[in-house]
């Protein structure tokens, strides 16, 4: 999602590289917040609603972590922030809607 992230990793996690990557995390947070909002406000078939809620909750949790990273002052603070992992919610939604999953 962000070219600066790769540069950050390649720069061995220096504070200077981290300062540049924080903008990317702020942008990712905004995108995930928007995704969560859209998931919650769009009409969904009843059989998919519980999985949609899980997916929206995951997007919000990831957005919160990204926001915390964007506010972090040092690389050390970055390491203290846990980003929630993909829990398969998107594939559950796809399956409920009869769409291909990411196998």
Image (tube, rainbow, N blue to C red):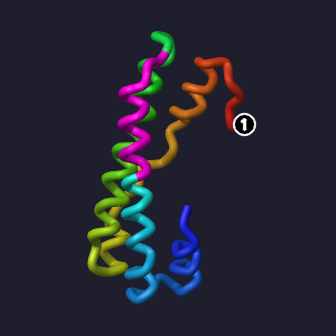
Residue 60 in the image: state x and y as whole percent.
35, 43
Residue 56 in the image: state x and y as whole percent.
40, 35
Q: Quadrant of residue 99?
A: top right
- Front one among 67 and 84: 67
Please, is residue 17 above or below residue 60 in the view?
A: below
Question: Is 42 colored magenta in this rendering?
Answer: yes
Q: Which residues are magenta?
A: 31-44
Residue 68 in the image: state x and y as whole percent.
29, 62
Give the quarter of the figure containing the C terminus.
Answer: top right
Residue 64 in the image: state x and y as whole percent.
31, 53
Q: Which residue is mark 1?
A: 103
Q: Residues within 10 Å of mark 1 (few under 14, many from 20)?
A: few
Q: Residue at x 45, y 26 (%)?
A: 52
Please, is residue 86 above or below residue 42 in the view?
A: below
Give the quarter of the figure containing the N terminus.
Answer: bottom right
Q: Quadrant of residue 101?
A: top right
Q: Residue at x 42, y 48 (%)?
A: 32
Q: Residue at x 43, y 31 (%)?
A: 39
């Amino acid at each position: 999602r962000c070219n600066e992230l790769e540069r950050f990793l390649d720069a061995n996690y220096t504070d200077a590289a981290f300062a540049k990557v924080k903008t990317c995390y702020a942008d990712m947070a905004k995108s995930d917040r928007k995704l969560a909002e859209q998931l919650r406000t769009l009409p969904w078939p009843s059989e998919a609603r519980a999985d949609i809620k899980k997916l929206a909750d995951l997007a919000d949790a990831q957005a919160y972590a990204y926001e915390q990273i964007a506010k972090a002052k040092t690389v050390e603070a970055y390491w203290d922030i846990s980003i929630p992992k993909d829990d398969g919610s998107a594939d559950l939604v796809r399956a409920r809607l009869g769409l291909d999953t990411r196998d």
